[in-house]
Image: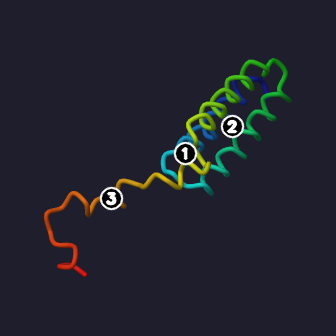
């Protein structure tokens, strides 16, 4: 398999899956995404001429780590649906 086929069959689907897993603030999904990125880097290292591709995927992983995905910083943040009640005018005890 050459580099283009590797990108089309493995690289693009894995990057889409990783992007979907890093959307929220879940430690489990972030951990799975990091494992997938590591496997993708290893795959591109093994393909002849895949060094720049491995570096590009590694930079994506580095950017995800730098933003704090899957770290203790996620614990302090809440998802948008967890704060929705704060923006309503209804009495909190009214719908309990």
Q: Nearer the viewer, residue 52 or 3?
A: 52
In this rendering, the label closer to the viewer, 3 or 2: 3
Indicate whether 53 appears above or below 78: above
Instruction: Please tell me which of labels 1 and 3 falls first in the chain.
Output: 1
Q: Nearer the viewer, residue 66 or 30?
A: 66
In this rendering, the label closer to the viewer, 2 or 1: 1
Q: Nearer the viewer, residue 17 or 28?
A: 28
Furthest residue toward left: 89
Q: Which residue is mark 2?
A: 10
Q: Quadrant of the N terminus?
A: top right
Q: Which residue is mark 1?
A: 22
Q: Which quarter of the figure has residue 11? A: top right
In this rendering, the label closer to the viewer, 1 or 3: 3
- Point 58% across, 41% down: residue: 68
Dot 1 falls on a residue whose secondary structure is loop
Q: Which residue is mark 3?
A: 83
**Separation (CA) of disc 3 from disc 2:** 37 Å
Instruction: Please tell me which of labels 3 and 2 falls first in the chain.
Output: 2
């Amino acid at each position: 398999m050459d580099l283009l086929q590797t990108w089309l069959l493995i690289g693009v689907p894995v990057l889409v899956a990783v992007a979907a897993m890093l959307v929220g603030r879940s430690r489990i999904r972030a951990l799975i995404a990091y494992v997938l990125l590591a496997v993708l880097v290893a795959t591109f290292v093994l393909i002849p001429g895949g060094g720049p591709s491995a570096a590009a995927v590694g930079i994506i992983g580095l950017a995800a780590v730098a933003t704090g995905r899957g770290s203790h910083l996620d614990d302090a943040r809440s998802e948008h649906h967890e704060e929705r009640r704060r923006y309503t005018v209804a009495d909190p005890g009214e719908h309990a």
